[in-house]
Amino acid sequence: MTDPTIMKYLPTLETERLIIRPITRDDVQAFYEMDSQSEVHIYLRGQPVQSIEETKGIIEGLHQQYEQYGVGRVAVIEKATNQFIGWTGFKYIDELTNNKINFLDFGYRFRKEAWGKGFATEAAQACMAYYHEEMKHFPIHAMTHIDNKGSRNVLEKVGFNVTDSFHLAVWDIDCYWYEINA
Ligand SMILES: CC(C)(COP(=O)(O)OP(=O)(O)OC[C@H]1O[C@@H](n2cnc3c(N)ncnc32)[C@H](O)[C@@H]1OP(=O)(O)O)[C@@H](O)C(=O)NCCC(=O)NCCS
């Protein structure tokens, strides 16, 4: 029998142009194509994935998070093409980050062909509406490279405010730290 706590916070959400749903092993090729684009990693660690095997490992790791916490990053599918264009959603952070632990990180990563069309914001609006309806009891933060203007715009459009900056040691980048408006 399926454990009822599993997938608890992994619903399928629908917006005008997008379907947002849990990532499956069938997403591996499109996930790899997105995550191997060097432009996608400019404000991340600068390390695009190198192989399908690496992406398979990332998806297994995501499924472990789904099982452990009932939450994790989710796929964004463009309805018009039925293509996986990226991921968004909530990751449960269980390692000390900017002196905080046990919180949800909100984030996203889209293939470069999907930028500049409002998809990231449309997906973020749906996720944050779901957060406010169902998940408000979890503390939530977001973080982004201080020069990642596109990402900062998305966060600010869905109600996040900068409250701090810090050095994200694991990626060796300077980040802004965001909290949501009360
Ligand atoms: C960060 C990232 C998701 C931002 O993507 P984006 O496409 O710029 O963000 P949005 O979906 O909000 O699109 C906004 C742009 O689409 C344009 N747009 C076009 N059609 C639109 C529509 N129908 N609705 C809204 N905006 C639309 C807007 O004018 C806006 O452009 P502007 O910022 O120049 O004004 C993207 O750059 C990315 O995936 N980067 C790589 C990974 C990454 O850095 N992730 C964040 C780590 S913290």
Image (cartoon, rainbow, N blue to C red):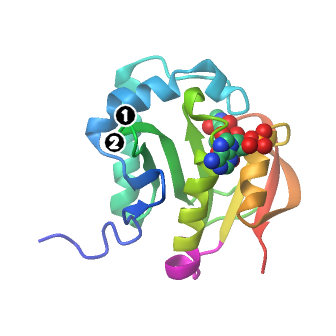
Q: Which residue is mark 1?
A: 57
Left or right for 177, reference 37: right
Dot 2, how many residues are within 10 Å of its Cα: few (below 14), some (14-19), or many (20+)?
some
Q: Do the numbered discs 2 and 1 sit on residues whose CB atoms are within 8 Å?
A: yes
Identified by mark 2, the residue type is: Glu
State yes or no: residue 136 in magenta. yes
Question: Which quadrant of the figure contains the N terminus?
Answer: bottom left
Task: Report the residue at 46% width, 56% height from top.
Answer: 72
Ligand 1 near label 1 (Cβ, under 8 Å)?
A: no
Residue located at (40% from left, 48% from top): 62
Q: Is residue 85 left or right of residue 3?
A: right
In the image, residue 182 sits, relative to residue 143, either above or below, namely below
Q: Which residue is mark 2?
A: 60
Residue numbers of the magenta segment: 131-139
Give above or below for 153 relative to 172.
below
Q: Is mark 2 within 8 Å of ligand 1?
A: no
